[in-house]
Image (cartoon, helix red, strand yellow):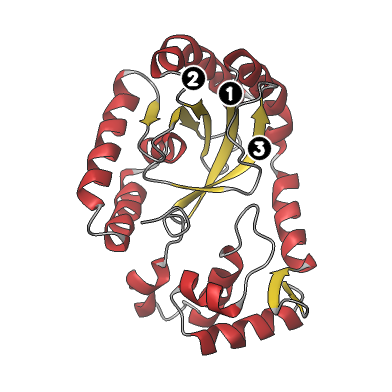
Amino acid sequence: MDHASENRAPEAKKSNVKEDRHFVTALARGLDVLSSFRSGEKLLGNQELAERTKLPKSTVSRLTYTLTKLGYLQYVDEVGKYRLGTASLALGSAMLSKLDIRQFARPYMQELADFSHSTVSMGMRDRLSMIYVENCRSQAALTLRLDVGARIPIALTAMGRAYLAETTSAERNEILERVREYDETKWPAIRDGVMRSLEEYKTIGCCTSFGDWQPDVNAIAVAFRPANGSSILSINCGGPVYTISREFLLDEVKPRLLELVDRLKRA
């Protein structure tokens, strides 16, 4: 599974939603097209969208035509590709504006980023990915370059594993089943990493990913459910292995990360 494909999840195709008479397949496919756009990518063509959604190109062409008419996509004639339209951007902005906890958390996240000379991020689950909804970097030159809107895989990253540890067993099992269906070959290694992280969460209070997602990235994370009962959020701290060691993360950063999350729980 390469970096581009590991964050995609054709869940609607492999779950039992087809058997649900209330499930609107066309709508799901349209949303799949929109979610194919990732942080840092501005333009995608029908062929690229077809590859990412695993849908026939003819189907994708009809979907992009409709989404363009509705303002969710904008066609760039010069290159024959699409960018997200204002309707899509408005939806994302509206969602972020409702996350008041971002404003509360930002100064504490920045303080931890400066202390650790790394990146501290807040994320929410979207299918088999975690999406960054807030991001703070230290002024150090070498940090991860992931911005708000970036997607990372749920089962390979500390942020995603913390979410899996915090959610219900029913939801966790459903997510992991979809991960298994998506990549049968790598599933045994993925499963072992997740199970190890779940045990870590019980014993040391955080989940880790030391080279599991990318070989040169170390990270730890803690998840929590805000006091207002909204969706589970995860906070991670990480960076390149040559600037932030696992020992430093566990010995120095973890107590501060746990204190940060405790503040947010009580916010």
Res. 199 visible in picture: yes
Q: Which residue occupies 67% across, 27% down?
A: 105
Q: Name the image quarter holding the C terminus.
A: top right
Left or right: where does residue 57 sit relative to residue 135?
Answer: left
Q: Name the residue under label 2.
A: 244
Residue 144: percent from left, percent from top: 58, 34
Q: Name the image quarter holding the N terminus.
A: bottom left
Q: Quadrant of residue 156?
A: top left
C-alpha span from label 2 to label 1: 7 Å
- Residue 33 or 174: which is nearer the viewer? 33
Task: Check disc 3 and report its element: helix, strand or loop.
Answer: strand
Residue 118 is labelled as 1
Residues at discs 2 and 1 in contact (Cβ within 8 Å): yes
Q: Which residue occupies 39% across, 38% down?
A: 161
The residue type indicated by label 2 comes to: Ile
C-alpha span from label 2 to label 3: 21 Å
- Residue 105 or 61: which is nearer the viewer? 61
Work out whether mark 2 precedes mark 1 in sequence or the reverse, and give the earlier one: 1
Work out whether mark 2 precedes mark 3 in sequence or the reverse, and give the earlier one: 3
Q: Name the residue under label 3.
A: 134
Seen in the picture, residue 252 relative to 182 is either above or below; the reply is above
Q: In which quarter of the image is residue 70?
A: bottom right
Seen in the picture, residue 130 relative to 255 is either above or below; the reply is below
- Residue 140 or 60: which is nearer the viewer? 140
Task: Check disc 2 and report its element: helix, strand or loop.
Answer: loop
Res. 227 visible in picture: no
Seen in the picture, residue 51 relative to 210 is either above or below; the reply is below
The residue type indicated by label 3 comes to: Glu
